[in-house]
Amino acid sequence: MSINTIIFDLDGTLLNTLTDLTNSVNHAMKKYHLPTHSQDSVRQMVGNGVTVLMERAIPGGKSHPAFDNCLKDFKEHYEIHKKDFTKPFPGIMEFLKEAYKSGYKMAVVSNKFDLAVKGLCEDFFSPYIHSAIGESSTVAPKPAPDTVLTAMNELQAEPAQCVYVGDSDVDIATAANAGIPCISVSWGFRNREFLREHGASIIIDSAKELQNAIKDSENPGE
């Protein structure tokens, strides 16, 4: 069975969101007189949702007395400023357009909160993305397979028809837990060496390589 469904991670895969995430983290940090972070530091903190991001950013994590307010202020700031500097990675829009024309069904699954995921996909990727699922109280976050399985259900796709594309160890584990192949991208928040160490079998360095990588994932070992 050939692949006709592509399920993407969002941050670090389709969108370069790092500057806006860093700015919102540091907005909250400054408000509560906490140490700020560089983009490289925030790069290592992302991937497991905004609650874990703020746990990693705040000294003492959830035990800090300002944690809940800090998380709330981060979310409010990010919702307003999530598109200040965010943009698709090079070649992404061209790929999505061609894949859409070729009949691929496409979804985004993310540990970013659901409102932001749906808003960013609508603003940047309409009409190409058919399903967008983020963090919520009703779906377990990655690396649990629930977001992927929900997307597959919405798109009426079988596992054998699907491939997952992401930039992190969380994405590799998510695809494995969902029982579908994973294509890892090196342009995101984790480098090629890190991805290889965490089990990546297919790694690409540009969006231009994605179509061939999908074919490789259909025929592993060939």
Image (cartoon, helix red, strand yellow):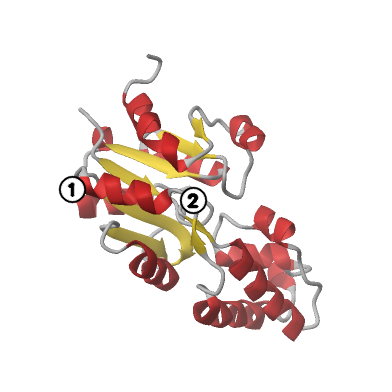
Rendered image quadrant of residue 62: bottom right
Q: Is residue 105 left or right of residue 214?
A: left
The residue shown at (44%, 57%) is 110
On screen, residue 40 above or below 113:
above
In which quadrant will I find the N terminus?
A: top left
The amino acid sitting under disc 1 is Gln
Q: Nearer the viewer, mark 2 or mark 1?
A: 2
Residue 131 location in percent, x, y? 28, 58
Residue 78 location in percent, x, y? 55, 76
Q: Is residue 88 left or right of residue 36?
A: left
- Residue 197's mark? none
Residue sitting farthest toward the top: 222
Residue carrying label 1? 156
For numbered disc 2, what is the local secondary structure? loop
Q: CA distance from mark 2 to mark 1?
A: 30 Å
In which quadrant will I find the C terminus?
A: top left
The amino acid sitting under disc 2 is Pro
Residue 156 location in percent, x, y? 18, 48
Q: Is residue 112 left or right of residue 147?
A: right
- Residue 90's mark? 2
On screen, residue 110 above or below 179:
below
The residue shown at (66%, 73%) is 23
Contact flag, marks 2 and 1 (Cβ < 8 Å): no
Rendered image quadrant of residue 175: top left
Q: Is residue 65 visible?
A: yes
Q: Is residue 176 visible?
A: no
Q: Is residue 188 left or right of residue 183?
A: right
Residue 93 location in percent, x, y? 38, 54
